[in-house]
Structures are given as C-alpha cells and as structure tokens.
C-alpha cells in the first residue's frame, strides 16, 4: 500500500489512463447476471460515507447482491479503519480504485467540490454511481453530469434518500388528480441548533499532511480542483463552512427539500428566477451564512419558498399550495423524518365557506382528507432502488435529470446570495444570466 510518498509514475499512469478513457467515452463494464453480487467501491469514508457503506454491506448480508469491495479516503486513518471493517483493499488515491475492473459501482461521499469530477471519471470508467447530495458544486457541473450519464449510459442515483419516501409520490398523484387545483407555491424549511448541526465537527489535532502513518492526510489531493491553500484543519474537518468546498445551508440542507418537491410537481422543473437572503447572525466562524432563505419562481406559474437556520430548530410545515386546496406532505416540517400520512385541505373563504365549487365537492368533499403513506427506512429503500437499477438499467428514483433541476435552483441561490442580486436561468443555453432570457 503506497502512502504519502506515492509513486509519481503510478499517478501519471493512472491520470493518463483516465484521460484516454475520458476521451473515448468508454470503460470496462462487467455484465451482471441475476445472481451476481455487485462490488461497490466507497470513495470518501468519513462519517457519512462509512455510514452509507455499512448500509450497503448490511443489505448485502441480509439479501445478498452487494458487497463493499474497496474503500478510498485521503486520510490514512479512515482507509485503515474501513479496510478492516469491510475486509477489502483501501487507497488514498481514488484513481487506483477506479482502475479496478472488478468494481461495478461506486459510492461517492467526498466534500461537494469533488462530487462531479469523481462521478464523471467513474462513469467513464464503466461504473455506476451512488452520489451523495448535493449532486455537485456548480451549475456547469450539473450539466456535465447530465451529459456524461447520457453519453455513457451509466446509472446515477443522487443520495438524497428522502426522495424514496412514499409521501412525495402520493402528493404527486394528489396534484395530478386536481385535488389542489392550479399549483401556486411550495414551501419548506430545514432548521438546526446543535454543535454537529452547525458543522463544527471534532478536529483531530494529530492529523494532517505532516502526519505519519494513520495520521497522514493527502491535503493536495483533498483540495483537488479548489484553490491551493496551506493546510487548515478547520477547512478539512469542517469544510461545509467554506465556499470553496460547499454551498453551506443551500447545498447541505435545502437539497433534501428541493429534490423531493420536484418529484411532487407534475414534472421536475428548472427555475426561471432565483433570489436569496440571510446572513451570519450567530456563528461568526465561517464564510457561509448561518441563516438562509431561498425564493425561486418557475415558468409554469408557481414559486418555491424555503427557510433555514443553524441557530434555531423550529421548522415550518412542508406543503404545496394550490388555488383549490393544499397538500401537506410533512406536517412536522422535517423532510428527512418519517410521517404516517399526508393531508389534503380544501380551501375556504374568510367567512368559512368552501370555495372549491360543486364539482370538486361532489368528487372530493369539503373536509380535510388524510392519506396514509408507507413508513419505511428511506436509506434502505433508496439503496435498494439503486441496486435494482444497476441490474435492470432503469432510471433511479433521484436520477441525474431530476437531481440537476434541484441543483440548479440551489446553486443559483448560493450565487444570488454571494452576488447580492436576483438571477435568471436560460434553460436553452443552460446558463445563469442577470436579466430575464428572451423567449
């Protein structure tokens, strides 16, 4: 196992091999039979990556079908621990893992700025991808991921597991059936108030690029496409506080809200206009805001309104308003927490009279309707959906196109906040612009 003194010749070889594969748009792929076990490579095995990898392994042990075949991380301690945990090979350089022909799919749970580059390389090397949210770091990367999925035919599931919950699909049917009339506005929130919730995770003072053995961190590799900087433990261990590697609240939290809302709508949609606000009101140890608001408008005639704070834990209900009624998918407001039912609430005038009309009343009534939903482990369902699609080559629950539409709204809100202006999206050119695009 090579460590901090990696052979440059080996790195150059792997980089060259990747470049050739990228240029040709090809890569080896094992054809999986119905009883073949899928071999998964986990890239980024910190807290989240190791947790999701264990979920893959647990499902494999319960029903077969998948095993963790290799792990990779830039911190040697994580490589060592996860090699032992999964009884597999481990690497500091993700390209060594991607060069293995016996790896069928990869889990990517790195910091956000590495999501798209590694996912694109993985797909061009013939591997399917389970890509932790957010899908990527920029609007351009969202397009690059969509283009790569189309060019390679690979399966890509964005790892926002809440999108596999039953309530979004029940809400989608409610809207399609006309139970809320014309859609007007979707709303949601994601609030926290804890040390972990504010991303101030524990720092290992012994770890770093000068560390020996398990304390070694390949800082240059970790930075990757980001700006070159001297090692900073706070940036490494608490990366979500910094713009170079994250979009803060928008990318870490709002992705779990915008993605399922896109599933509820008649079809996933790009935003037309996006604006954002907020600020650093309590936690002055970061670049990203600790309180953040997003407003997006869509060409089909509805808006999206989201709020979040790292310094207050009170949520607002997750719902979609229509002219004739409202569908409430997450009454407690916590998009990642299970719920037992959704509610459809017909509209009434200020005097308490129903305004839905006789036809609506005859079909649906004028009282609130509760629709039960399945309560399942969303992560298990999401992983199983991915594994099924690896075998069937079907489109997963959170496919790249739906994921990209959510990502564009989120990335635009980050840009809007940082630039202090309203932004528009030119869908025909896949470009963020300062003025409404011409029809």
Image (cartoon, grey):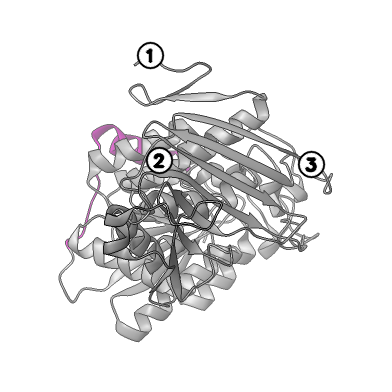
Left or right, 129 with reference to 259: left
Q: Nearer the viewer, residue 147 or 233?
A: 147
Q: Quadrant of the C terminus?
A: top left
Q: Nearer the viewer, residue 16 or 154?
A: 154
Decide which of tag 3 and tag 1 comes sooner along the chain. 3
Which segment is the magenta one? 10-31
Instruction: For marks 3 and 1, give the one nearer the viewer.
Output: 1
Label 2 near label 3: C-beta < 8 Å?
A: no
Label 1's element? loop
Q: How many discs mark residues in the rendered view?
A: 3
- Disc 1 marks which residue? 438
* Occupied quadrant, residue 380: bottom left
Label 3's element? loop
* Occupied quadrant, residue 332: bottom right
- Disc 3 marks which residue? 280
- Disc 2 marks which residue? 405
- How far separated are the C-alphas under marks 2 and 1? 20 Å
Residue at the image position 45 percent from the left and 41 percent from the top: 117
Q: Residues within 10 Å of mark 1 (few under 14, many from 20)?
A: few
Decide which of tag 2 and tag 1 comes sooner along the chain. 2
Question: What x and y, as percent, mark residue 303?
Answer: 48, 39
- How far separated are the C-alphas under marks 3 and 2? 27 Å
């Amino acid at each position: 196992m090579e460590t901090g003194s990696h052979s440059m010749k080996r790195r150059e070889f792997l980089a060259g091999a990747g470049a050739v594969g990228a240029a040709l748009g090809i890569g080896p792929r094992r054809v999986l039979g119905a009883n073949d076990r899928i071999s998964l490579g986990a890239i980024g095995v910190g807290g989240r990556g190791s947790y999701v990898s264990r979920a893959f392994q647990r499902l494999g042990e319960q029903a077969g079908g998948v095993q963790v075949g290799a792990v990779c991380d830039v911190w040697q301690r994580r490589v060592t621990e996860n090699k032992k945990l999964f009884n597999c090979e481990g690497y500091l350089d993700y390209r060594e893992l991607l060069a293995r022909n016996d790896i069928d799919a990869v889990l990517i749970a790195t910091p956000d700025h590495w999501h798209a580059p590694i996912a694109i390389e993985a797909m061009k090397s013939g591997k399917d991808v389970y890509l932790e949210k957010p899908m990527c770091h920029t609007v351009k990367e969202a397009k690059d991921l969509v283009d790569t999925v189309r060019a390679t035919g690979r399966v890509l599931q964005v790892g926002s597991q809440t999108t596999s919950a039953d309530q979004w699909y029940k809400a989608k049917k409610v809207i399609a059936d006309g139970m809320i009339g014309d859609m007007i506005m979707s709303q949601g929130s994601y609030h926290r108030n804890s040390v972990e919730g504010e991303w101030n995770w524990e720092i290992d003072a012994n770890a770093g690029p000068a560390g020996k053995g398990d304390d070694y961190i390949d800082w240059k590799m970790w930075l990757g496409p980001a700006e070159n900087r001297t090692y900073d433990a706070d940036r490494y261990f608490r990366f979500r506080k910094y713009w170079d590697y994250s979009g803060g609240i928008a990318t870490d939290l709002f992705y779990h809200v915008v993605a399922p809302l896109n599933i509820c709508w008649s079809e996933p949609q790009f935003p037309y206009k996006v604006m954002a606000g907020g600020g650093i009101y309590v936690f002055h140890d970061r670049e990203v805001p600790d309180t953040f608001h997003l407003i997006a408008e869509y060409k089909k005639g509805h808006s999206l309104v989201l709020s979040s704070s790292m310094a207050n834990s009170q949520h607002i209900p997750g719902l979609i308003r229509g002219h004739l009624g409202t569908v409430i998918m997450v009454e407690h407001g916590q998009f990642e927490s299970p719920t037992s039912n959704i509610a459809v609430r017909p509209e009434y005038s200020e005097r308490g009279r129903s305004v839905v009309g006789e036809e609506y009343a005859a079909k649906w009534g004028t009282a609130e309707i509760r629709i039960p939903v399945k309560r399942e482990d969303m992560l298990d369902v999401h992983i199983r959906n991915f594994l099924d699609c690896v075998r069937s080559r079907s489109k997963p629950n959170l496919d790249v196109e739906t994921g990209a539409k959510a990502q564009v709204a989120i990335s635009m809100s980050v840009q809007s906040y940082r630039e202090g202006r309203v932004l528009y999206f030119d869908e025909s050119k896949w470009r963020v612009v300062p003025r409404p695009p011409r029809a």
